[in-house]
Image (cartoon, grey):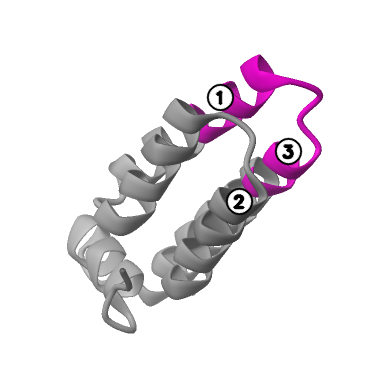
């Protein structure tokens, strides 16, 4: 499950009318926020915290129509803490870079 290179940039450009500076800023904000959610999942003290962070990541991904990241975050939320799912979430986020 990967997305085509540049899909995040393309989606952002469509949303903001091609303003390159704004696209770069929004991209950086998205990646920073998503990275924080993944980090919080890796340090979640329990099932509820893991699920909350996975759902936040799913919602963030949905905001940018990043279907693959949404799907893996949803799987993680449903399954609970799992190192393999955490790796899958991190891989899906890396595909967005």
Q: Residue 51 lies in what quarter of the image?
A: top right
| Mark 1 surroundings: few (<14), some (14-19) or many (≥20) residues within 10 A | many
Residues under labels 3 and 2: Cα distance? 11 Å
Of pointers 2 and 1, the one earlier in the residue sequence: 1
- The residue segment tinted magenta is 38-56
> Observer-nearest residue: 1 or 12?
1
Rendered view: 85 above or below 49: below
> Observer-nearest residue: 33 or 75?
75
Residue 22: percent from left, percent from top: 43, 63
Rendered view: 47 above or below 56: above
Secondary structure of the residue carrying tag 1 is: helix
Residue 40 tag number: 3
Residue 16: percent from left, percent from top: 26, 58
Residue drawn at point x = 64 percent, y = 47 percent: 38
Tell me the mark number nearer the camera, choosing from 3 and 2: 2
Number of on-image labels: 3
Q: Residue furthest top?
A: 48
Residues under labels 2 and 1: Cα distance? 12 Å
Residue 86 tag number: 2
Name the residue tied to disc 1: 51
């Amino acid at each position: 499950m990967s997305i085509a290179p540049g899909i995040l940039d393309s989606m952002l450009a469509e949303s903001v009318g091609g303003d390159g500076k704004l696209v770069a800023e929004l991209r950086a904000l998205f990646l920073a926020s998503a990275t924080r959610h993944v980090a919080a999942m890796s340090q979640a003290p329990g099932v509820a915290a893991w699920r909350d962070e996975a759902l936040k990541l799913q919602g963030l991904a949905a905001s940018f129509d990043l279907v693959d990241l949404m799907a893996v975050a949803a799987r993680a939320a449903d399954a609970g803490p799992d190192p393999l799912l955490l790796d899958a979430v991190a891989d899906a986020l890396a595909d967005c870079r």
